[in-house]
């Protein structure tokens, strides 16, 4: 969930397409060591998706193809 949360925070902050480097840097600010494979997997799953739809889908539990517990 921390990787997905970081991704969403970055998009809310104006970064429309956060990179693995962006996510890693954000997590490092709070002392979290990132796993690059998990971040790359998340970015691949979110590619081409509207972030607002992702947020709404996660809130309603209707976004089954993205398992937020894995990130």
Image (tube, helix red, strand yellow):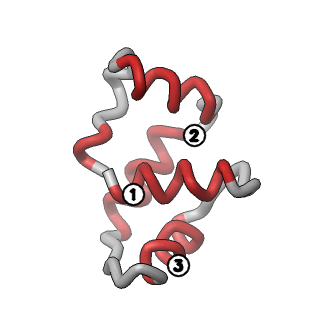
Q: Residue at x 51, y 39 (%)?
A: 46
Q: Where is residue 32 in the image (x, y as percent from the top left)?
A: 33, 78
N-terminal label among 3 and 1: 1
Q: Name the residue under label 2.
A: 47
Q: Name the residue under label 3.
A: 25
Q: Around disc 2, counting alpha carbons within 10 Å, would you say few (fewer than 14), some (14 to 19), or many (20 or more)?
A: few
Q: Where is residue 34 in the image (x, y as percent from the top left)?
A: 35, 73
SS at mark 2 in the image: loop
Give the Cα distance between marks 2 and 3.
20 Å
| Residue contact between numbered discs 3 and 1, judged by CB atoms under 8 Å | no
Give the Cα distance between marks 1 and 2.
15 Å
- Height in image: 71 above or below 46? below
Q: Name the residue under label 1.
A: 3
Q: Around disc 1, counting alpha carbons within 10 Å, would you say few (fewer than 14), some (14 to 19), or many (20 or more)?
A: many
Question: In this image, 4 relative to 26: left or right?
Answer: left
N-terminal label among 1 and 2: 1
Closer to the eye: label 1 or 2 = 1
Using the image as rendered, state which of residue 5 and residue 16 is in the foreground. 5
- Height in image: 53 above or below 3? above
């Amino acid at each position: 969930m921390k990787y997905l949360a970081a991704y969403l925070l970055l998009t809310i902050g104006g970064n429309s397409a956060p990179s693995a480097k962006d996510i890693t840097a954000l997590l490092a600010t709070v002392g979290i060591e990132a796993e690059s494979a998990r971040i790359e997997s998340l970015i691949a799953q979110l590619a081409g998706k509207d972030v607002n739809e992702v947020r709404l889908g996660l809130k309603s539990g209707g976004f089954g193809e993205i398992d937020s517990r894995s990130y």
